[in-house]
Amino acid sequence: MKIAAGQINSVIADFEGNREKIVEYSLRGAKEGADLIVFPELSLCGYPPMDLLDYNSFVEENTLSLRWLQRHLPAEIAVAVGHVSLNSSGTGKKLRNVISVIYGGEVIFTQDKTLLPTYDVFDETRYFEPSSERKLFTFRGEKIGIAICEDLWWESARDTDSVYPIDPVMELLDLGAEIILVPSASPFHKSKIKKRLALCRKTIRKGASSVFYINSVGANDSLIFDGNSIVVDRKGRLVKKAADFEEDFFVCDPDDSCNEIELEYDKYGEIEKALVLGLRDYVHKCGFSRVHLGSSGGIDSALVAALAVKALGAENVKTFAMPSRYSSDGSLTDSKKLAENLGVSYDVIAIEDMFTSFLGALEPHFGGREMDVAEENIQARIRGTLMMGYSNKWGSLVLTTGNKSELATGYCTLYGDMAGGLAVIGDLLKTEVFDLCRYINRDGEIIPWEIINKPPSAELRPDQKDEDSLPPYDVLDGILVEYLMNHRTADEIEALGYEPETVEKIVKLVGRVEYKRGQAPPVLRISDKAFGTGRRMPVARKLYEV
Ligand SMILES: Nc1ncnc2c1ncn2[C@@H]1O[C@H](COP(=O)(O)OP(=O)(O)OC[C@H]2O[C@@H]([n+]3cccc(C(=O)O)c3)[C@H](O)[C@@H]2O)[C@@H](O)[C@H]1O
Ligand SMILES: Nc1ncnc2c1ncn2[C@@H]1O[C@H](COP(=O)(O)OP(=O)(O)OP(=O)(O)O)[C@@H](O)[C@H]1O
Ligand SMILES: NC(=O)CC[C@H](N)C(=O)O
């Protein structure tokens, strides 16, 4: 049995574009002799459609697009596509998350999703009724079962997030399934592919003859889908893998494939590709083609500029240096060199006159109080205003440059450097920012080494250094990993050997600046615990000092 993978980048709500792509890939599958082609979960409407599902017209478009596919798909190949449909059982939620198999103009089989993830970034029980029935279909003599994304994750969800009463894969195998298809919309986080491969191998150990894990690719808001569709054969060997972070297609007969593929893991290569895809898809799917940002000569803005060039091309990226009285000489020379290295346009807008003017206007209202963060932040806000002004005039999107360590501790200015459309590196700890920059420079300087090697500074007051306000970044990031990702309490973190005073200061800071993150732009998610919808915290509360 030859099964093809249609690893496509669906655009949410672009029914016409998505179904045409499904036809295009199916024609290719038919031409290359595949019996069946599998597309990702919700490939017709895009994933996750969120509250668009509250509109009847959106649900109807799913059905009409399915009908259109019945008429337009090549007759000689079976096609498994993901879509939503009405729950006709009369009880429960209005909708179901479904895979339909179309063959010869007919829907010959449907399977609804059983396990609906509702942890972290997922919210599927908000919309969908789980399937109460696991079924098989027989095609060209093979018994095939379909487990839709989370349906395969019973095993690992049990250890972490949710306990499900049913193991859908085991039920499919009890019914006699040989081939297990897993159409998925499985978002990326670091090394996720290893987890998926382990789950496919576990399915083989339960008795499947092969597993086809067909994943989405592309980014939707914060979520980045890495593709990386895989096939595992009856011996548990990885016999086929699609490209990562781009659309791809393959045909595979696992019984004919005898070479095992080695999974190569390159941590920063993977992160770089994820952020480039996340940035490109956000910009293009929102209808923009160009971006710009403030370039301070610091490492964060340098990294964002370099990623933007990889995503959009140098001609679509513009950088602005906006020096103030506190900017170092290096701020201008380094940001200029960065622009030259990247081949992007570079302009200077001095903010001194505007800063002086703001200080003059506020002076009678500041009551002679000493200079403090109020004046510091005015500089950041002038820069934010200038960047948004340029955006309005030219239809170019502003990229923000804050990293996860800064967003965690609130070391950033609301309506200042936080003003913009997309937080490109908001899920990268500062120590990872350094490592990714070094990775980008691995074959020669792209980001000037002067930028990477100087001590980080916000340059909002004389001789300011980040380490005047924050602990050294390796200590800060260590504490943040334990607190944010591993959910350890302050006491538990102290027991790991961190200084109690520092731990308490950081834990308090994280809680106190929840309001800032509530107003931050979407953060591209690359970890299994990112700021955004996957971490929901009350803002108005008594600070609970865990
Ligand atoms: N619960 C709440 N809900 C909504 N809003 C709330 C709030 N609590 C305070 N606020 C508001 O937030 C204001 C305080 O926040 P904000 O104005 O941002 O200012 P703030 O957090 O006080 O200061 C910003 C800090 O970030 C540093 N910084 C700035 C820029 C760049 C970088 C960098 O290195 O990248 C670092 C800067 O040196 C300073 O230490 C309050 O005055 C109040 O208006
Ligand atoms: N002089 C400046 N010219 C242009 N943009 C600036 C300037 N200063 C700050 N910005 C903008 O504000 C953001 C935050 O400033 P900040 O200086 O703290 O960060 P950075 O320089 O990118 O990195 P680092 O935190 O390592 O200094 C910058 O990334 C940049 O987008
Ligand atoms: N769409 C889904 O069901 C995704 C859930 C799955 N556990 C994943 O992260 O890949």
Image: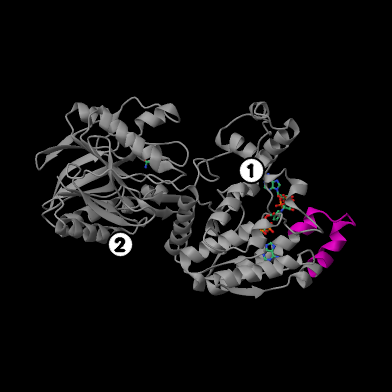
Ligand 1 within 8 A of label 1's CB?
Answer: yes
Nearer the observer, 222 or 54: 222
- Residue 472 at x, y percent in the picture: 71, 44
Give the vertical position of 495 relative to 426 (above or below).
Answer: above
| Residue annotated with mark 2 | 17
The range drawn in magenta is 357-377
Ligand 3 within 8 A of label 2's CB?
Answer: no
Q: Residue at x 72, y 33 (%)?
A: 504
- Residue 60 at x, y percent in the picture: 28, 52
**Which residue reaches farthest left?**
141
Mark 1 neighbour density, 10 Å: few (under 14) some (14–19) many (20 or more): many
Mark 2 neighbour density, 10 Å: few (under 14) some (14–19) many (20 or more): some
- Residue 463 at x, y percent in the picture: 81, 57
Q: Magenta span: helix, strand or loop, mainly?
A: helix
User: Which image quadrant: the C terminus?
Assistant: top right
| Residue annotated with mark 1 | 514
Please name the colour scheme applied to the rendered image.
one colour
Q: Can residue 468 be seen in the rendering of this structure?
A: yes
Nearer the observer, 88 or 18: 18
Judging from the image, what secondary structure is the residue with disc 2 in? Answer: helix
User: Residue flagged by tag 2: what amino acid is it?
Assistant: Gly
Q: Residue at x 64, y 75 (%)?
A: 347
